[in-house]
Image (cartoon, grey):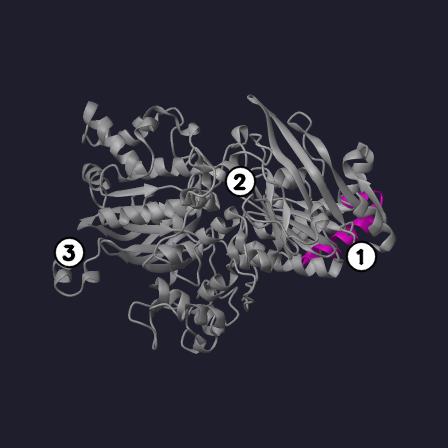
Amino acid sequence: MSEAMTSTGRESTPTASPLLRVRDLKTHFPIRKGVLSRVHANLRAVDGVSLDVATGETVGIVGESGCGKTTLGRTILRLTPATSGSIHFDGHDVLSMSSSTLRRVRRDMQIIFQDPAGSLNPRMTVASIVGEPLMIHRIATGRNMSERVAELLEKVGLTGDDLHRYPHEFSGGQRQRIGIARAIALNPKFIVCDEPVSALDVSIQSQVINLLADLRGEFGLSYLFIAHNLAVVRHFCDRIAVMYLGRIVESASAANIFASARHPYTMALLSAVPEPDPQRKRSRIVLRGEVPSAVDPPTGCAFHTRCPFATDICRSETPPLTGKTGLSDDHIVACHHADELLQFPASTDHVSASGGDTL
Amino acid sequence: MTSVQTADKSGRRHQPLLRVEGLRTEYRSDGGTITAVDNVTFDVRRGEVLAIVGESGCGKSATAMSIMRLISPTAGRIASGRVLFDRDEESVDLLLLDESAMRSVRGQHISMIFQEPMTSLNPIHQVGDQVAEALLAHGLANRREAWDRAVTMLGKVGIAAASERARDFPHQLSGGMRQRVMIAMALMCHPKLLIADEPTTALDVTVQAQILDLLLSLKESQGMSVMLVSHDLGVVAETADRVCVMYAGQVVELAPVRELFANPLHPYTRGLLESLPRISDAKERLTVIPGSVPNARRFPDGCRFHPRCGLTRELACSGNRPVTDGVLARCIRDVDGQQGGSPTLQEAEPEHFVACWEVPARQDNQPESAHV
């Protein structure tokens, strides 16, 4: 089935044969209670996500904490078991593959974590941290391995002298570089970056983002870039998907999300980001309340409890994620009122500010 | 000193609410002492939001903790300096107060809120009791009154159904609600100064916007000053009146917010602003400040920013300045040729202070520069 999809896809458009194809993915965590630990309820961390990532493309996932972005990334790599749906990576069905196939496919899909201190073993030297994937996949040993590790360290801006040092001897930014060196050790095609710069100092963030961009250019990597910093996502990603309570509510090219957001949640999110420019006074949509619990999400459109434009239909029917008139082809929105909301741009400033970009 | 006394006579409006002078705070560590705050001087004026901005380890939180005298004696000490605070129409040096006098200043005159509300709230007490506690501790109300005023304050900080929420325990509230409770606690005694240490860092952007709006409206309605400690230049740009930029334990630049963002003078501030990705313009590649934030155990000699400074390298390459080891000689030695001195804060433009050898001080009005 996936074979058929990819072969027909190649003839039409390049986006039709994505490297990663996720369809209606659900990841629910059971909440158990009582002596028999019966399943009492389900926490719907990811609740029906469909997503494509093309070769060489960077897709950003944004949303508030608890919207399921991290779980989505982990489920795609099968680090967290999926409840239902399908994931195809490079022609392989990720959810049904055997563990030996999975191990082989994992060479091509890697992850970079938010907290570089917590994701590196403090008892291992840099040489063994970065060399471990090479050893597990029996790609290099002995002399070959140290050469390859030194080469990787240089790629990420560290030196061969750092080989025998331990993670605590490095700064936060350097530790994140070690995490990146480890992730690219097996020449992957796809990397999930889970908040890769959130824990870093401002002056270090730009260094790491530039490094990720260089690697993308050099190895033709695809990224799923999970972040809550919208400015970083805007800078780094080709396409952006906005998540709310386990679902994608809007997805478009990075420029279009910022220029013509149509979902009220996206608008509110964009207007809430403080911009480092005191001259600019913006109209801000301040949302009331916080993200509701994913155990018992609101009926209909999950956003209706906080949405300033919600009506009866929003409370009863879940809006489909579809294209709308007046939007570019790749721009999809899940909102009953998206057509009417054209009259309520998130902030005139955003539209005019992005007007100079090539859209 | 003189400026404070003259201000006393000429009317209090122009006198700052808080004046920190030459503050120096040291922490003990395995490898000797670490100077986390080094000769820091600034004012907080009446009714303003002063932002202290910097990266981790630059000493911004240590400065806030020193003002409140919350540095644990086992961890470190305030080595020198003065913290002049205008308490009930009289200027007092907080560093000279005895512990009981200081305790009455905390909460009553100066309050503080922290980054992580969960660790600052007591998990086994109802939030209403915790908010009321400040009044009881300072003997300003009896139990019932204190509870009622706590409920009113919880309503003021935007908690719906405050009388019921007051009976909740911290774990029953969301992160944004907990931060509102912290703010309510801090405001119970109507302090004149609120020190907010990264108040929104642990919150989502939409909740952050709510909390910042709340802080600004309370600042107006309560007529207080706010000292906002933050690493987020976006938050600073939107909330502060003046900004104090710290690097490696020192103040490197201090200016009104519009002036700072429009005309940053210190190479560090310039680098920070240039390195930010911005929503409104998509750049191909981000500008970077090379290297990393120095470790407090071994700050560089001379200007502490010189190993990462673009201006220094640029000028050194031009060849018409004295250079040592590829760096401008002046950046690693002070004027007297002594190694290790850092540049001091000087007024370069009206109201705009910067600590950089390469930025000339304003010619007229020189004596003013000694008093920020």
Give percent across and percent down for residue B163: 71, 55
Q: Quick check: is A298 in the magenta stretch?
A: no
Judge whether residue B156 is colored magenta: yes
Residue B265 in sight in this render: yes
Residue A76 location (% of width, % of height): 30, 48
Q: Position of residue B371 (x, y in %)?
A: 72, 47
Dot 1 amino acid type: Arg
Q: Residue furthest right?
A: B9
Q: Earlier in the sequence, mark 2 or mark 1?
A: 1
The amino acid marked with disc number 2 is Ser
Dot 1 and dot 3 within a common chain: no
Q: Which residue is at the front of the view, A200 or A63?
A: A200
Q: Nearer the viewer, mark 1 or mark 3?
A: 1
Which mark is nearer the camera, 2 or 1? 1
Amino acid type assigned to the residue bearing label 3 in the image: Met
Residue situated in front as seen by the camera: A273 or B83: B83
User: Circle 1 marks a residue in which chain?
Assistant: B
Residue extending furthest toward the front: B320
Camera sees residue B137 = no
Q: Chain of mark 2?
A: B
- Mark 2 vs mark 1, CA separation in Å: 34 Å
- Say which mark, if any, is on residue B13: 1
Q: Which residues are magenta?
A: B134-162
Q: Which residue is mark 2?
A: B56
Q: Which residue position is annotated with label 3?
A: A1
In this rendering, the answer to whether A297 lies above or below B250 is: below
A29 w.r.t. A249: above or below: above
Cα separation, mark 1 vs mark 3, equals: 77 Å
Marks 1 and 3 close (CB-CB < 8 Å): no
Q: Main secondary structure of the magenta part?
A: helix
Q: Quadrant of the N terminus of chain B?
A: top right
